[in-house]
Amino acid sequence: MLKKIISGDIFLTLAVTAFGLAVIATLLVVVGSLFVS
């Protein structure tokens, strides 16, 4: 059961990291478009 929780945490961490990178990329695009215009 402990191994299941650990592997689940790894997947959760990867998901959160991917989501965070997507959010940061979106913010960079928005800020970049604001500076361009």
Image (cartoon, helix red, strand yellow):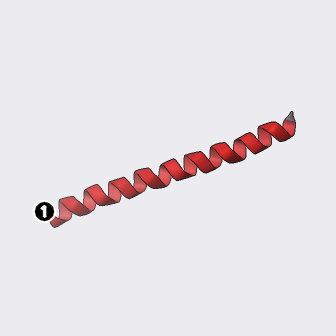
* Number of numbered discs visible in the structure rendering: 1
| Residue type (three-letter) at the residue carrying disc 1 | Ser
Q: Secondary structure at mark 1?
A: loop
Instruction: Identify the residue at horizontal 78%, vertical 42% (top origin).
Output: 6
Q: Where does residue 12 sit, x and y in percent of width and height?
A: 64, 43
Residue 6, placed above or below residue 36: above
Instruction: Identify the residue at horizontal 71%, vertical 47% (top origin).
Output: 10
Q: Could you say which quadrant of the image residue 26 lies in?
A: bottom left
Q: Could you say which quadrant of the image residue 33 lies in?
A: bottom left
The reply, left or right, for residue 21 in relation to residue 9 is: left
The outermost residue toward the bottom is: 36
Which quarter of the image is occupied by the C terminus? bottom left
The reply, left or right, for residue 12 in relation to residue 7 is: left
Which quarter of the image is occupied by the N terminus? top right
Q: Could you say which quadrant of the image residue 8 lies in?
A: top right
The outermost residue toward the left is: 37
Q: Where does residue 28 sit, x and y in percent of width and height?
A: 33, 60
Circle 1 sits on which residue? 37
Instruction: Identify the residue at horizontal 19%, vertical 64% (top origin).
Output: 35
